[in-house]
Image (spheres, rainbow, N blue to C red):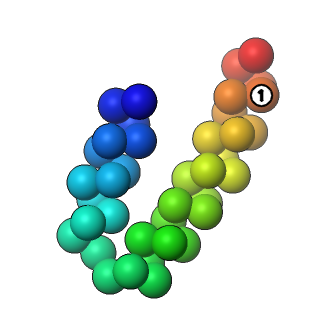
Amino acid sequence: MSKLYCLLRLGLTLCQDSWELMLEVYISKGIDQYQWVQ
């Protein structure tokens, strides 16, 4: 959850488009990492 919070804080300093793109990339990578760990 701390990673998501940090990304949220970072996203708030960027423009909306960049934030949405970063969020999509983070979610896709996060899911891959989660499945790999599990």
Find residue 27 and report its horizontal and vertical position in percent.
61, 50
Identify whether 34 is placed above or below 20.
above
Find residue 22 and report its horizontal and vertical position in percent.
50, 65
Q: Residue at x 70, y 39 (%)?
A: 31
Q: Which residue is drawn at 28% across and 59% down?
A: 10
Q: Which residue is drawn at 76% across and 16% down?
A: 38
Neighbours of disc 1 within 10 Å: few (<14), some (14-19), many (20+): few
Identify whether 6 is placed above or below 11.
above
Q: How many labels does the image show?
A: 1
Find residue 36 and report its horizontal and vertical position in percent.
77, 26
Residue identified by numbered label 1? 35
Relative to 24, is 36 on the left or the right?
right
Q: Quadrant of the N terminus?
A: top left
Q: SS for tag 1?
A: helix
Quadrant of res 19:
bottom left
The three-letter amino acid code for the residue at tag 1 is: Gln
Relative to 23, is 18 on the left or the right?
left
Q: Out of 8 and 32, give the one closest to the viewer.
A: 8
